[in-house]
Image (cartoon, rainbow, N blue to C red):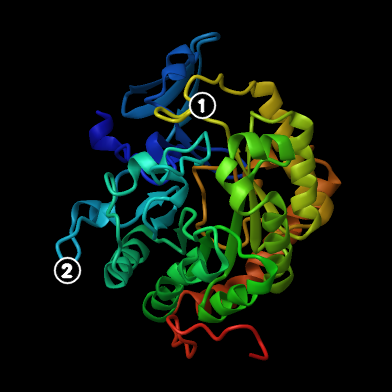
């Protein structure tokens, strides 16, 4: 039944997309989520998915309350191949309503003898198996075009694990360099909004962010995972040793100053570090003009934290109520660009359901509605391909050199 109605389970990238894509309808907006299925802790859930009279319901077995949900179908282009014969779904997949593409080989923190990968991650078990190890630019363009035309995709997100070796002269293999040809190709041949999530560069290489912006990038996201430095070191040993937590902060602050409020995000995990640190992370991210994307910790099958308990739902409710409050307090835009619904993290716009529907609440949402209206001409221009004069293979280098 699910095989006919829903998107298939695909254990790609870091592993969070390995569950069931599900949409919860609501009066403010529909909320997309990726529901864990394969992990052991799922058996303890009081929630049951069932189908009655053609309608899917989530049933709470504690109270017998039932909630209607929608299962987005698998797009037709998943079953097709590129002109080179590569299955399109092994190039990129829908994560909610956006197209996610992992552009690098396995994160270097998974290298034999290195073994400093993040303890919650499973990318080293997935990249090259569920998806193509090396993705050709022309095939990425084909998949992005199909996703735009058939699935209404407005946002393409490029992601890479850590690639740079621990020496300055190896910076040419940094994720930003890897992303550059893809960003330019999408801007020139497909159009739409383009995001990049790679390891941060250090301050002397911040010019690379300017370069990616000139090539067509609209968004940067930074996965620093934990605000508490001890938890960052404990659960992200590779990131801590090779980059340091401060590198994420400085890169996020720089790109937020370049792209403007609400165009950059800081990604964190809720449910492992003390909740006060997670709340502090939300306050910090919004204070620099970025928006927080919060992953609820999932003890992924095959990860080093597979046996850890899932977080307390009341704690998560408190975290996401704080996301909404911080977004309103700092006036960070949300839900302005059409059709960007993320299933792997909780969108700041989703957290409106936890806000107090007072005058302040209504004023913020009215402002966002006005911004959506005013942004329509900009969105229309962005969705059209346009030529880019900057080279994607010959970086301009720091200004003045």
Callout 1: SS = loop
352, above or below 101, in the image: above
Horizontal side, residue 152 vs residue 83: left or right: right
Q: Quadrant of residue 274?
A: top right
37 and 120: which one is in front?
120
Q: Earlier in the sequence, mark 1 or mark 2?
A: 2
To which residue does mark 1 refer?
305
Q: Quadrant of the C terminus?
A: bottom right
The answer to whether residue 383 shows anywhere in this view is: yes
To which residue does mark 2 refer?
83
- Residue depicted at 71% across the width and 59% down the height: 333
Residue 200: % across, % down: 60, 60
208 and 193: which one is in front?
208
129 and 88: which one is in front?
129
Horizontal side, residue 23 vs residue 132: left or right: right
The answer to whether residue 362 shows anywhere in this view is: no
- Residue depicted at 73% across the width and 61% down the height: 250
Q: Quadrant of residue 277?
A: top right
Q: CA distance from mark 1 to mark 2?
A: 40 Å
Residue 373: % across, % down: 64, 68
Callout 2: SS = loop
Q: Residue furthest top?
A: 62
- Residue depicted at 42% across the width and 55% down the height: 100
Label 1 neighbour load within 10 Å: few <14, some 14-19, many 20+:
some
279, above or below 285, in the image: above
Residue 364: % across, % down: 78, 54
Label 2 neighbour load within 10 Å: few <14, some 14-19, many 20+:
few
């Amino acid at each position: 039944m699910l095989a006919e109605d829903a998107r298939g389970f695909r254990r790609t990238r870091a592993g969070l997309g390995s569950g069931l894509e599900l949409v919860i309808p609501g009066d403010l907006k529909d909320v997309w989520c990726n529901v864990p299925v394969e992990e052991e802790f799922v058996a303890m859930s009081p929630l049951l998915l069932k189908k009655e009279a053609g309608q899917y319901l989530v049933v709470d077995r504690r109270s017998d309350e039932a909630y209607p949900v929608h299962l987005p179908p698998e797009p037709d282009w998943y079953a097709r191949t590129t002109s080179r014969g590569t299955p399109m779904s092994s190039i990129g997949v829908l994560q909610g309503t956006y197209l996610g593409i992992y552009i690098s080989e396995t994160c270097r923190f998974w290298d034999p003898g290195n073994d400093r990968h993040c303890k919650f991650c499973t990318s080293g078990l997935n990249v090259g198996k569920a998806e193509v190890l090396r993705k050709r630019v022309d095939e990425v363009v084909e998949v992005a075009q199909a996703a735009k035309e058939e699935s209404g995709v407005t946002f393409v997100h490029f992601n890479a694990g850590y690639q740079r070796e621990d020496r300055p002269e190896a910076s040419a293999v940094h994720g930003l360099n890897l992303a550059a040809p893809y960003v330019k190709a999408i801007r020139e041949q497909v159009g739409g909004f383009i995001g990049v999530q790679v390891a941060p560069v250090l301050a002397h290489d911040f010019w690379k962010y300017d370069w990616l912006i000139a090539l067509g990038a609209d968004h940067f996201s930074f996965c620093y995972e934990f605000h508490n430095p001890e938890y960052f070191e404990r659960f992200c040993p590779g990131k801590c040793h090779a980059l340091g937590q401060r590198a994420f902060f400085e890169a996020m602050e720089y790109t937020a100053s370049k792209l403007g409020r609400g165009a950059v995000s800081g990604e964190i995990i809720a449910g492992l570090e003390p909740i006060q640190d997670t709340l502090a992370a939300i306050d910090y991210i919004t204070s620099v003009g970025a928006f927080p994307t919060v992953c609820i910790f999932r003890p992924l099958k095959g990860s080093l934290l597979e046996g850890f308990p899932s977080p307390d739902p009341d704690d998560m409710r408190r975290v996401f109520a704080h996301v909404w409050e911080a977004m309103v307090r700092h006036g960070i835009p949300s839900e302005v660009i059409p059709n960007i619904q993320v299933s792997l993290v909780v969108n700041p716009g989703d957290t409106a359901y936890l806000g107090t529907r007072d005058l302040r609440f209504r004023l913020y949402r009215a402002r966002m509605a006005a911004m959506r209206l005013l942004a329509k001409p900009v969105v229309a221009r962005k969705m059209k391909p346009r030529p880019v004069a900057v080279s994607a293979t010959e970086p301009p280098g720091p200004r003045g050199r």
